[in-house]
Amino acid sequence: MKIGILGSGLMGAKLGTIFARAGHEVVFSYARSEQKLKRLAREAGKNAKAGTPREAAEDADVVLLAVHWSRVNDVLKQAGDLAGKIIITCSLPMDEENTELVVGGKSSGAEELAKKVPKTAVVQAFNTVPSEVLFGVFEARKKSKRPSLIICGDDAKAKDVAAGLIRDVGFDPVDVGPLQMARYSEPFTMLIAKIAYEGDGGPELAYRFEWYS
Ligand SMILES: NC(=O)c1ccc[n+]([C@@H]2O[C@H](COP(=O)([O-])OP(=O)(O)OC[C@H]3O[C@@H](n4cnc5c(N)ncnc54)[C@H](OP(=O)(O)O)[C@@H]3O)[C@@H](O)[C@H]2O)c1
């Protein structure tokens, strides 16, 4: 799969690296330094390269949106036409200080994003775990008990593609339904962040749903 990374920070750099190591073709884009993008591509191996947001998006089957909420419009403008693409967003609608959600209740960041990118299939995933846990989950992917990862979206085929990528990283996808469910998953992330960054166990935290039926 060809994956364009829009936003190569804590989330985008790690997920792009894992996708490349899992065999996908990855283009890292949108950082403040081109050198950083080149270094990430080098470290991620032969399947990765650096590019502009437009280059990352143009041939991509899947685009990962991993920027601060305040940068969404800018990166989308730079990426150009995304019609027909699957957009996986881990971006949360946070304020500048990263302390509060600025969208919630009757909408969500994922739904507001979907309005900005018509003719695309938006899937929300990877937003409910801290970046610090991603490499650890990837390293542990052969173990039988995998952590869960909430996924939502309105396009079943796009969710299937996203679920495959989620499995490649080492999570067990839990499809909670339409994109509207992001109204609940985004505040859930605030709870996860509280445990990860203020709890005693540290930020290398994932979660797992268990059924006893
Ligand atoms: N971090 C987490 O654990 C986590 C977990 C769940 C969800 N999220 C959400 O995921 C999204 C990404 O988070 P993150 O922590 O990965 O953010 P981040 O580390 O700040 O990465 C954002 C990327 O955007 C780039 N960028 C920022 N301003 C730019 C500009 N003016 N021009 C070009 N590039 C610019 C940054 O460049 P540089 O590389 O040069 O800084 C970086 O590559 C956010 O919406 C966040 O709320 C994060």
Image: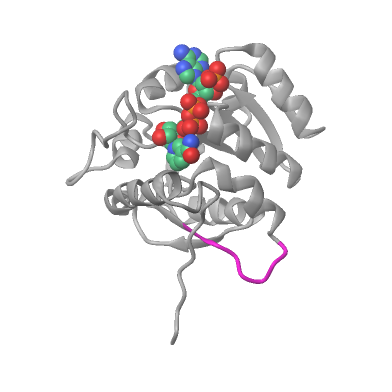
Residue 85 or 36: which is nearer the viewer? Answer: 36
Residue at horizontal 43%, vertical 43%? 197
Q: Can you name the residue that lies furthest to the left here?
A: 106
Q: Is residue 88 visible?
A: no
Residue 72 covered by magenta stretch: no
Q: Is residue 93 visible?
A: yes
Q: Can you name the residue that lies furthest to the right here?
A: 46
Residue at horizontal 44%, vertical 61%? 175
Residue 205 or 120: which is nearer the viewer? Answer: 205
Quadrant location, the C terminus: bottom left
- 22 vs 207: above or below: above
Quadrant location, the N terminus: top right
User: Image quarter for residue 25?
Assistant: top right
Q: Position of residue 118 (x, y in %)?
A: 36, 33
Q: Can you name the residue that lies furthest to the front here?
A: 200
- 171 vs 145: above or below: above
Residue 155 or 99: which is nearer the viewer? Answer: 99
Locate residue 189 relative to residue 18 in the image: left or right: left
Give the colour scheme shown.
one colour
Q: Which region is colored magenta?
A: 142-149
- 197 vs 115: above or below: below
* Magenta stretch: helix, strand or loop mostly: loop
Q: How many marks?
A: 0
Locate residue 111 relative to residue 130 in the image: left or right: left
Q: Position of residue 42 (x, y in %)?
A: 78, 25
Q: Position of residue 206 (x, y in %)?
A: 51, 56
Q: Position of residue 166 (x, y in %)?
A: 58, 53
Residue 147 covered by magenta stretch: yes
Residue at horizontal 73%, vertical 26%? 41
Residue at horizontal 67%, vertical 71%? 144
Locate residue 109 relative to residue 23 in the image: left or right: left
